[in-house]
Image (spheres, rainbow, N blue to C red):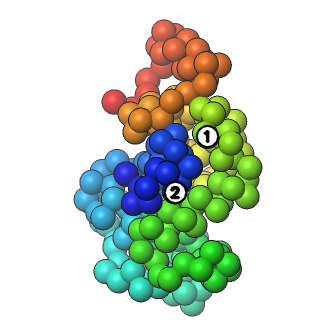
Amino acid sequence: MPRIEARAAGGRNVCAFLDMLAYAEIGEAMLALSDDGYDVLVGSLPGAMETFSSYAEHPLAEAEAIEYAPGLWSTAAGRYQILARYWQHYQPLLALPDFRPESQDRYALQQLREQRALPLIQSGRLRRAIAACANIWASLPGAGYGQHEVAFEELMAVYQQAGGRLASRDHHWFEAVMRAGGAPHE
């Protein structure tokens, strides 16, 4: 669960969406093995997890990028895999005191706000909300960054397990996929 309260986040659906993002970016196994993903560094795998111990500031500067694949470097860190260059912009803008979990949640909420995804999430229009945010998070379907993208069906199942409610159209779509033999995460 995100550390920010549902009321401050914009409701239960928004909290469920944040949980779904963490699942997509970090993965179920590493969420369980870490501080719910808030302390995970880019390139981590369940058997080789890299974490950081201080939430005082973003753990990676541009000069400290991690090579997570041959020739690919990143400063992504935390539950939502926040890049250091974006954190430098948003930390003062949002008056975030540190890189603690609630600060990471507030950063992610700002990203959702800027993508105009919050009303979509709050009304349960998950497919449209995911599409609106795919350019921000590489793990979302349609992101196109060449990284693993989690399927809509799996994300919908995770979202619902986290307490999110789907709008009728998305709910009917999900039910039809399931009847047709879709295989969301269990």
* Image quadrant in which you'd find residue 168: top right
- For residue 128, above or below residue 62: above
Residue type for callout 1: Ile
Nearest to N terminus: mark 2 or mark 1: 2
* Residue furthest out toward the bottom: 63
- For residue 130, above or below residue 124: below
Q: Which residue is mark 1?
A: 121
Residue at left offset 43%, top offset 56% = 5
Tell me the tag on residue 8.
2
Residue type for callout 2: Ala
Element at badge 1?
helix
Q: Sort mark 2 into few (<14), some (14-19) or many (20+) by Cα contacts within 10 Å.
A: few
Residue at left offset 60%, top offset 39% = 122
Q: Is residue 165 left or right of residue 140?
A: left
Query: Where residue 98 appears, x then y in whole percent?
Result: 47, 82
Residue at left offset 56%, top offset 49% = 10
Q: Is residue 18 left or right of residue 170?
A: left
Q: Quadrant of the C terminus?
A: top left
* Residue furthest out toward the front: 7
Residue at left offset 48%, top offset 19% = 182
